[in-house]
Every structure is written in C-alpha cells, then in structure tokens.
Image: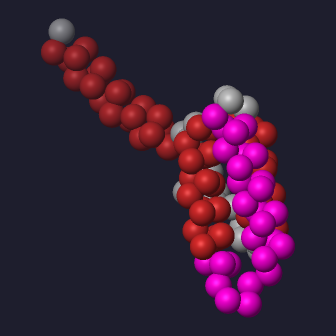
Amino acid sequence: MAALTGISLAMLAVAQPAAEAAVTRSEYCSRLGLQLDGAIQAKAEPGANATEIAEATALQDKANRFCAERKQAQGIRTYANALKLLGVTPVDLNQ
C-alpha cells in the first residue's frame, strides 16, 4: 500500500509542472491587457502619434469587453492588433 501511495505521489509530482505551464485564455487576456497598458504608457510621451494611441485605446476597450463577455479568442486577437499597431510584439503563451 505504501508503494502504491509513493507511486501516486511521484506521478502527481510529474504531472503538476505540465498543468502549471498551461495558460488559459482568460489569463492570456490579462497578460495582453497589462502589456498593452504598458505599451500605451510608453508611447504616450511628448511627440507621440496621438492617432495611434487613440486607436490602440479604442481597441483595448473593445478587447476588454470581449474578454469580459467570455469571448477571449476575439479579445486576444484585438489586444494583439492593438499591440501591433503600437509596434509591440504580443507576449508568447509559452513564457
């Protein structure tokens, strides 16, 4: 019985890191939202292109609504488009 318990614990220890590595769409929405916040703040300096910032902010609002309405795939795409508009590469899911 002790051997069976030991094997079960060993298998659980091996399976745990794989479960932690998976990022849900909700978490990815949050990560991209934070990244976009930082990108907008970085671009909002004197002499920055106000049109790009306004468009990125509008896309951010749209992405926030998508993520809140459980339409994370659309929200993720919208965040990515806003980041690309500002010249920023979206974060990678595997990081």
In terms of depth relative to the viewer, which is nearer, 20 or 46?
46
Q: Residue placed at 83% from the left, 73% from the top?
A: 51
Residue 6 sits in quarter: top left
- Give the answer, above or below, for where 47 lies relative to 94: below
Answer whether residue 76 is visible to the viewer in this image: no
In terms of depth relative to the viewer, which is nearer, 93 or 19?
93
Residue 56 sits in quarter: bottom right
Prevailing secondary structure of the magenta residues: helix
Specify the farthest residue to the bottom. Answer: 47
Give the image location of residue 94, x and y in percent: 59, 52
- Give the answer, above or below, for where 8 lies relative to 37: above
Answer whether residue 70 is visible to the viewer in this image: yes
- Give the answer, above or below, for where 48 lies relative to 3: below
Left or right placement of residue 82 versus residue 19 in this view = right
Give the image location of residue 23, x and y in percent: 56, 41
Residue 54 on the magenta segment? yes
- Give the answer, above or below, for where 77 lies relative to 89: above
In terms of depth relative to the viewer, which is nearer, 76 or 54?
54
Left or right placement of residue 16 versus residue 54 in this view = left
The magenta stretch is: 42-68
Q: Residue placed at 78% from the left, 50% from the top?
A: 78
Residue 40 sits in quarter: bottom right
Q: Residue placed at 81% from the left, 72% from the top?
A: 52
Quadrant of the image containing the N terminus: top left
Q: Residue placed at 60% from the left, 73% from the top?
A: 41
In terms of depth relative to the viewer, which is nearer, 4 or 16?
16
Residue 34 on the magenta segment? no
Number of numbered tags placed on the structure image: 0
